[in-house]
Amino acid sequence: YDLQSPEIFPLPDQVDEISGITFFNDSTLLAVDDEHGQLFKLMLQKNVEISGFRFGEDKDYEGIARVDSDVYILQSKGNLYRFPYNDSIHKTDKIQLELKGKNQFEAFYYDGVHQKLVLICKKCDDDTKVSSTAWAYDLSTSQFDQKAYFTIERAAIEKVFGEPIKRFKPS
């Protein structure tokens, strides 16, 4: 990718509120709508072609990851929705994170080395003023880890940026 001369694809208003994207293949992206349980397939051509599929209820969705033929979508409360990707969605599995307290997640990715889906807290009960937690769903056991997968320390971020920050909240 050439940052000095990027390729730009104008998108219609239909996808103004996407909160996560992932590659499906070299010329296609999958995107999740922030609030409406809608998955979009964006075929990147001169004129972007978009198709949409409903996978769930109106909720606050934060991210998307594709693992082989399955799509995983993160709801801000920490629930995951899984379904096999094809041109119509017939069954969606809900995977519920059993974490005490109020928890809000904002970022999500697939760790292919460890075969885990990683959910990063925006504001979780286990967070402190100086750190944020991340939790993992282990695809090999189909279970959430019982302990935080890792923490992001504010001091480490300050070191990278060379300046103090009040509080780190992934967003």
Image (tube, rainbow, N blue to C red):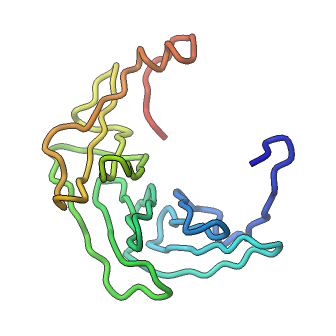
Q: Residue at x 85, y 41 (%)?
A: 4
Q: Position of residue 16 (x, y in %)?
A: 65, 63
Q: Residue at x 64, y 68 (%)?
A: 15
In the image, 36: left or right of 28?
left
Q: Position of residue 43 (x, y in %)?
A: 67, 74
In the image, 76: left or right of 22?
left
Q: Nearer the viewer, residue 100 or 151?
A: 151
Please tell me whether residue 102 is drawn above or below residue 110 in the rendered image: above
- Number of numbered discs on residues: 0
Please tell me whether residue 139 is drawn above or below residue 133 in the rendered image: below
Please tell me whether residue 86 is drawn above or below residue 30 in the rendered image: below
Q: Residue at x 55, y 68 (%)?
A: 24
Q: Position of residue 35 (x, y in %)?
A: 47, 65
Q: Residue at x 43, y 27 (%)?
A: 168
Q: Nearer the viewer, residue 37 or 5?
A: 5
**Residue 2: which quarter of the image?**
top right
The residue at the far front in this view is 113
Q: Position of residue 45 (x, y in %)?
A: 77, 73
**Residue 132: which quarter of the image?**
top left
